[in-house]
Amino acid sequence: MIVITGAAGFIGSCIVAGLNNSGENELVVVDDFSNETKNRNLANKTFELKIHRNDFPEWLKNNIASVDLVIHMGARTDTTEFNYTILEELNLNYSKTVWEICAFGQIPLIYASSAATYGDGALGYTDDDLLCRQLHPLNPYGISKNEFDKYVVNNVYHTNGIAPPNWYGLKFFNVYGPNEYHKNRMASVIFHAYNQVNEKGEIKLFRSHRNDFKDGEQLRDFIYVKDVISVIDWLRKNKPSSGIYNLGTGKARSFFDLAKATAGAMEKKLHINWIDMPEDIRDKYQYFTEADMHKLYDAGYAQPFYSLEQGISDYTENYLLKGAYM
């Protein structure tokens, strides 16, 4: 069977849907299940067992022989959370426990890292396993994710280290798509843009607070969640060399492009309301991210990614306009 942690969340629930669509129904879903809005993401999904995240490590220890793969998406994903103790417990220590059990039981593991680990991008966006030792993330969330990458690398490259038989740390860039209704402030810019057009007829975008970027010209690598599902499906079936892999499209796009594509998908005229970036995130904001995707391509992945326009069109027409879930 396959275990998905963070299964009621945005990416986790989409992975469950993707597995079901591939004929995989022997699934174990792990989360805290305390948010009823979030739990709607699992409606109409097929799985065998629900386990509270607090009970999962002990369950995994006792069921090693029956688990074929752990997809560990569970994490505190709030990039504005500045209490590192919370992030250390949920994103670092909990993940260490999952890693150690998978290593001991020789269970393959796919886990969520983040492009937030790259900080201001001064060292580039190359997914070399050892680069994590030199990175300086801009916020506690990024730090917690990078600390786990460092823990993994130290285990893998240390003579006495332990590791699962196949493992993949996926550095997610800006993921968007169905099943993020519950995420509030941390939902994708596309989700917020859609709601802003519906409510006010305009899209709010941050002004630039750097001289080398014009307003709306800040660049991010936006990746549609259906591409995330495709990559994870490919990794579990093809088992390329273990390692840390970027997961973006490899093409940075501007927030203005995003706003234009969202309004276009809604068949609305584009109106932008420029707002100042909140001071609490201003010095921690990434103005440019773009995944170097050579490692995944060199491993054999050949499926094309959705363009920003294609992804926004599918998300808007098939989910947001219908209030539908994946």
Image: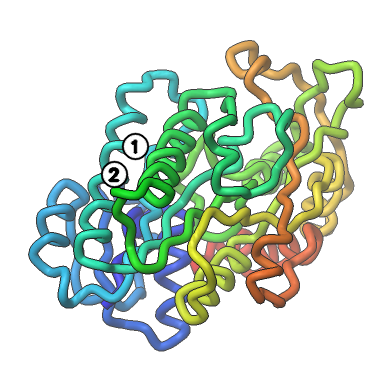
Q: Residue 253, how many percent across, how many down?
A: 82, 47
Q: Residue at position x 88%, y 48% from top?
A: 269
Numbered badge on residue 321: none
Circle 2 residues within 10 Å: few <14, some 14–19, many ≥20: some
Circle 1 residues within 10 Å: few <14, some 14–19, many ≥20: many
Judge whether residue 123 can be spotted in this image.
Answer: yes
Q: Residue at position x 67%, y 42% from top?
A: 189
Q: Residue 120, how many percent across, how many down?
A: 69, 27
Q: Residue 287, how many percent across, how many down?
A: 76, 30
Of all residues shown, which one is farthest toward the front?
159
Element marked by disc 2: helix
User: Does 216 sit above or below residue 225?
Assistant: above
Q: Which residue is mark 2?
A: 96
Between 90 and 68, the one nearer to me in the picture: 68
Q: Residue at position x 37%, y 83% from top?
A: 24
User: Does 299 sit above or below residue 320?
Assistant: below
Q: Which residue is mark 1?
A: 92
Q: Quadrant of the N terminus?
A: bottom left
Question: What is the spatial separation of the Cα atoms under label 2 and label 1, in whole angstroms?
Answer: 6 Å
Q: Are marks 2 and 1 in contact (CB under 8 Å)?
A: yes
Of all residues shown, which one is farthest toward the bottom?
23
Element marked by disc 1: helix
**Taking 113 as reference, is 262 left or right?**
right
**Taking 181 as reference, is 291 left or right?**
right
**Taking 323 as reference, is 72 left or right?**
left
Look at label 1 and name its amino acid: Leu
Q: Residue 262, how many percent across, how many down?
A: 77, 52
**Taking 26 as reference, is 322 left or right?**
right
Look at label 2 and name its amino acid: Lys
